[in-house]
Amino acid sequence: MPTLKKFTLLELTKDLDVKIQGNPDCMITGVSPVHQAQAGHITFLTNPQYRKYLPDTQAAAVILKPEDAAECKVTAVISANPYFVYAKIAGYFDSQPEVTVGIHPTAVIGEDCEIDPTASIGPNCSINDHSKIGARVVIGPNCAIGNYVTIGADSRLDAGVMVYHRVNIGKRCRLASGVVVGSDGFGFANQKGTWHKVPQLGGVEIGDDVDIGANTTIDRGAVESTVIEDGVKLDNLIQVGHNVRIGAHTVVAGCVGIAGSTNIGKYCMIGGASNFAGHLSVADKVIITGMTAVTKSINEPGMYSSGIVGAVPNYEFLKNNARFHRLENLMQRVKSLEAAVKEMTERE
Amino acid sequence: MPTLKKFTLLELTKDLDVKIQGNPDCMITGVSPVHQAQAGHITFLTNPQYRKYLPDTQAAAVILKPEDAAECKVTAVISANPYFVYAKIAGYFDSQPEVTVGIHPTAVIGEDCEIDPTASIGPNCSINDHSKIGARVVIGPNCAIGNYVTIGADSRLDAGVMVYHRVNIGKRCRLASGVVVGSDGFGFANQKGTWHKVPQLGGVEIGDDVDIGANTTIDRGAVESTVIEDGVKLDNLIQVGHNVRIGAHTVVAGCVGIAGSTNIGKYCMIGGASNFAGHLSVADKVIITGMTAVTKSINEPGMYSSGIVGAVPNYEFLKNNARFHRLENLMQRVKSLEAAVKEMTERE
Amino acid sequence: MPTLKKFTLLELTKDLDVKIQGNPDCMITGVSPVHQAQAGHITFLTNPQYRKYLPDTQAAAVILKPEDAAECKVTAVISANPYFVYAKIAGYFDSQPEVTVGIHPTAVIGEDCEIDPTASIGPNCSINDHSKIGARVVIGPNCAIGNYVTIGADSRLDAGVMVYHRVNIGKRCRLASGVVVGSDGFGFANQKGTWHKVPQLGGVEIGDDVDIGANTTIDRGAVESTVIEDGVKLDNLIQVGHNVRIGAHTVVAGCVGIAGSTNIGKYCMIGGASNFAGHLSVADKVIITGMTAVTKSINEPGMYSSGIVGAVPNYEFLKNNARFHRLENLMQRVKSLEAAVKEMTERE
């Protein structure tokens, strides 16, 4: 294992808007969850359920809100947003492999490419003609980049990312392994019972600061481009159909499917395993809870849900499932009752 | 960007069953959606909602149905199936990278392979022993092909496709990046609490004209083969279990899961995010709407659905979800009411 | 095709706890399903529905339970667990490509790696610094392994598997093509509307005898590691979020999503396309039926379900779906009826 990392609390917090209560020179050697904090580590407290661990923590320092500072017997890093402060501090302890600048000799580079000399192109990659790779971009092993692709400065593609032709990726993006960007949208015209491919002529436009999780797929547009705006965060195994637009700073959890031409607004939060039908429009600041089936446009901000959630013992489920399939019948029986009771009441 | 493509309308339609109203020699330089048609472009009209854009279109030509021709002030390409005509014309404007025939020097080819001299094998590919690659087949970068594989003429594997041993792929197929064909089916025998792998001895048989979307997985059969018949179109992130058969010309949208040994008929349409239990049989010409859970065989053509769709405000959902879990109780209450009303009626 | 494999029944069963009724020296040349058994093949009978095929089977031998032996006119291999015996015998007929020991010349190996001389590293792989590859490990073509990774003896990574840094994989594991292990968990801290990455400092710990299906993704932990215990079997296209723990000998079918920090017990069986919210705890020996949405912890063994399953004709579905969205209203009407009937009864 590599040498232990070690920083004073002051070094770790020098660019952050925090107040330190205690010893700013204490040495920090790692991070821990609050309920398992180890000596020399820094931890954070955001969830009130974990406050009980605070008095006895072994941590060297705890990042917390002003209202929790009084209870903290070790050094406290006080912030209105402890999780954000934690995110910035944790970056110092990241153990990602160091990057070797330059083009690995096994990489295959096409004609007329512009590859910034500070970029790193890993083993067994290929980059097709006319593509531009920006400053400090890292392309991991076994990536394949099509032609006329641009990748902005400081973006990072992990091993095994596949980018088709005519895709633009912004700055500071991160694409995890197995991501596919620019595959053909699912478009077929039926002629006498057989399906004929509709060429997918659009591209994919990905903004700055976009994260895309492992094995997520983003199809190219049919005519115009599929668009992922700045700051969007996509988790793993998400399907983004052709001509979809996802608005800036929207987060989408894993296993979500978004059918073609659906337009999701900015600052939305989409729960895992939700699915969107095609050609819908979802307003800004919409929250979709997990496993929701969105089949109509949503025009107002708010929290939306569908489906049946909550696993119950199978025998209960079987009864309720059967009842569901006869809900219409139940309704008719209630209507009959209503009519009978009304008649009786009127007769009295 | 590469040179602009440019064709006369006559060139574009020469093999198509269309009637031209207007100028067959007009130059076409691209395609546009009907509501954003640009000068020099060709567009198409199929959705009646977009008919309002027809009178003012800037397009050079519009592909449309006979009944819409009268309203078209620019050149019209008249067809009973405008979307199919569009699909064929759009092919002229496709900007896919040109293919370099031959085997890239970084590709690793096994023994006793037959690779047609017109095929293209991309950088960093490997093809294992005894495999046959047909005429004009294109295998993109970073593909790995197992042994005893055959790939028929004019098929195309995009970058990063993984094909296991003893898989047969027909002619004119297209496999998008990240597709896996021939991985082991999910078969384990339990012996005293631990699971033992059941060897998966079958292969995968893929017919002609099959499209498979990005990161879709197709498992090999347990004893017999998994079969995808001619003309099937699979979207992205679909799971096809071992011994599944999908009938000819069936289309399956993204994020669908098909458990082992299920047999789906010909000319079916399967909506996105639907799931099929194993060992089912689905008739020909069945339509399954999106997000349906198919747990029993379907013996008749028609449109089938399940689940709860339609996202509603979360507070409504929570109430209905809770009610659902007490549906059995609701039914019992209705039965009591029915008995009470019956008794009262009889007493009168 | 390669030479036909051929064994006597005695050879095939020599390590198995079985009783042979008939000819132990009969030659076996392959396996078949019971309803399609071919001459010279061995087959097995576990499902009572297939017992009808037993009297007329063309198979050379049938693996079956004691109670079925009397009806078997060919050689019978009698076992309390015929499917397990089949699994072991089928292994003799597996046609997986032979493995070439050693490091392929196109593979790129980092510094300070320990690669057992009996391991096989395929074409166009890369292994980053300080990683350890055990005895008889097989790494297929186009895999990328990060630094400080360990892979235990007899494990196998098929083509195109991506393993990030600081991941430990046990012995006798098998990872199918497209698997991603160790990608960053989905953690972002919101500061003034934009999302900031929370570094994912944990690793992934995978036990012995773990199988992972094609294109499944397993994220690394946020601080501690994501853990997959011994004997776990994961199917294709599963998402395992950061800090998840899956207990020993649990099986998970395809298309399942497990959100972060959820803890699934040992000896569980999780049906396909089920989804788990985050931070849940599921007891040992829990069975979750397919397509279930698990949103609360489950503390007792048993079979659990949710959702609406069973596709019905679309017009029925539409009615029931609409009724569901007015369940609360239906309940209120039933309550009114109950009040009315109660009043009438009391008045009488």
Image (tube, coloured by chain):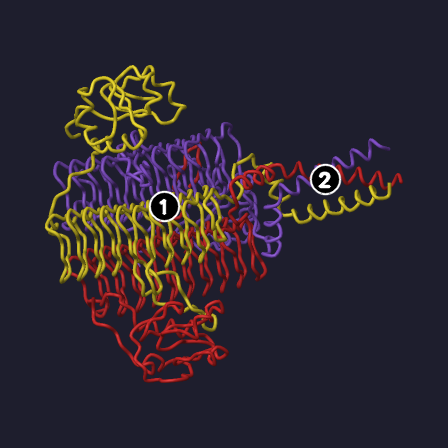
Chain colours: A purple, B yellow, C red
Which residue is found at the position 75% from the left and 37% from the top? Answer: C336
Query: Where's residue A44, x and y in %?
Result: 48, 46
Q: Quadrant of residue B70?
A: top left
Of C184 and B265, which appears nearest the observer? B265
Q: Quadrant of the rendered structure where residue C305 is?
A: bottom right
Q: Is residue A24 visible?
A: no
Amino acid on which disc 1 is placed: Thr
**Residue C138 placed where, x, y %?**
26, 64
SS for tag 1? loop
* Callout 1–callout 2 Cβ contact below 8 Å: no
Residue closest to the eye, B192 or A344? A344
- Across and down, in percent, residue A208 comes to 32, 33
> On the rendered image, what quadrant is the N terminus of chain B found in?
top left
Q: Closer to us: mark 1 or mark 2?
A: 1
Farthest-out residue, right: C348
Q: Residues within 10 Å of mark 1 (few under 14, many from 20)?
A: many
Where residue B165 is drawn, which disc sits there? none
Q: Residue at x 30, y 36 (%)?
A: A220
Looking at the rendered structure, whether the residues under marks 1 and 2 are on a common chain is answered as: no
User: Label 2 sits on what residue type?
Assistant: Val
CA separation, marks 1 and 2?
Answer: 45 Å
Give me the chain letter of mark 2: C
Q: Is residue A287 left or right of residue A240?
A: right
Disc 1 is attached to a residue of which chain?
B
The residue carrying mark 2 is: C334
- Using the image as rendered, state which of residue C128 and residue A168 is in the foreground: A168
Q: Is residue C7 above or below residue B127?
A: below
Look at mark 1 in the image and give the residue it sits on.
Answer: B250
Q: Tell me if mark 2 has few (under 14), some (14-19) or many (20+) residues whose alpha carbon lies within 10 angstroms of its own.
A: many
Would residue C253 be visible to someone looking at this image? yes
Residue drawn at (49%, 42%) of the image: A21
